[in-house]
Image (cartoon, grey):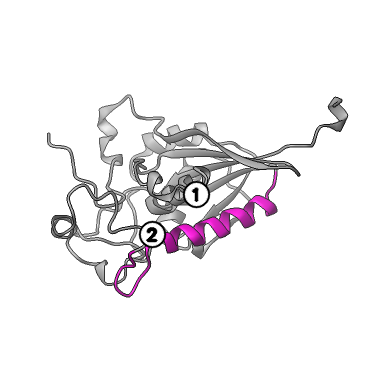
Amino acid sequence: MTGTDKPKVVTTRWWWVRHAPVRNDGGNIYGQSDLACDTSDTYVFNAVAKVLPRKAVWYSSNLMRTHQTAEAIWAAGFPRPASMKWEADLAEQNLGRWQGMNRAQFIASRPVGSSWFADINEPAPGGESFMDLYNRTRRTVERINNEAAGQDVIAVAHGGTIKAAIGLALDGQVERALSFDIDNVSITRLDYFSSPERSVWRLPMVNQQPWIADDAHAEMHQLAGPEVKKLA
């Protein structure tokens, strides 16, 4: 096969950014509650602004903490894009009646070693299961892969949403994706390679934190699920 006969491969690069920390949750599970986030750590946003690609299309969830996070990145010197599309399907998992419950008490009520709020197929009362989140994230990613084929895509979203995207990149191994930490304002890069013959994903980096060498910014580690905090 000559070079001209080879099928063309289109690479779409996803740059996922988790929102900044939520400080006003009262220690409670917030899920899709539309809470503000803390964007005061300018050192963190300066570092992230230097890493993200300049020529990219921007997407976010419909929740304010993702919009505030994007605004903080732009304020740190990243050129403001002409637009940023809001995608409700990139929102965090709807945790229904678990939202507003004390996080520590909820964790204590779940089986030891749980890697998320519940089994991936168990819906929260009045809300969604993680598989529901995965399926709407997958549909949106697949649509954007067509809309923005061959481009850099910056998506400001949530810990659960980004884990769902990792599950897609792991060829649908959804539960394995829950093993990954996704820290606040961290960058996760997932590359999608598509050709007429086949499509594959690559995971160049997960949970990258450009500021990590400085312990002063350790508060960017905020739980994205029912993880057990490490003892001091």
Is residue 122 shown left or right of residue 28? right
Q: Residue 230's quadrant in the figure?
A: top left
Q: Is residue 141 magenta?
A: yes
Q: Residue 79's quadrant in the figure?
A: top right
Residue drawn 31% across the image and 68% down it: 124
Q: Residue 118's quadrant in the figure?
A: bottom left
**Residue 154: x percent and y percent?**
55, 45
Q: Is residue 3 magenta?
A: no
Residue at the disc numbered 1: 172
Label 1: element kind: loop
Majority secondary structure of magenta residues:
helix
- The residue sitting at the bottom extreme is 126
Q: Which label lies toward us, 2 or 1?
A: 1
Is residue 213 shown left or right of residue 187? left
**Mark 2 to mark 1 CA distance (whole Å):** 13 Å
**Residue 107: x percent and y percent?**
18, 55
Which quadrant does the C terminus fall into?
A: top left
Residue drawn 57% across the image and 59% down it: 139
Residue drawn 34% across the image and 29% down it: 212
Which quadrant does the N terminus fall into?
A: top right
Could you tell me if residue 71 is visible in this image?
no
Q: What is the tally of numbered marks visible in this picture? A: 2
Q: What's the amino acid at mark 2?
A: Phe
Label 2: element kind: helix
**Residue 147: x percent and y percent?**
69, 54
Which segment is the magenta one?
A: 122-149
The one nearer the camera, 58 or 16, is: 16
Q: What's the amino acid at mark 1?
A: Gly
**Residue 204: x percent and y percent?**
52, 31
Residue drawn 43% across the image and 32% down it: 47
Residue at the disc numbered 2: 130
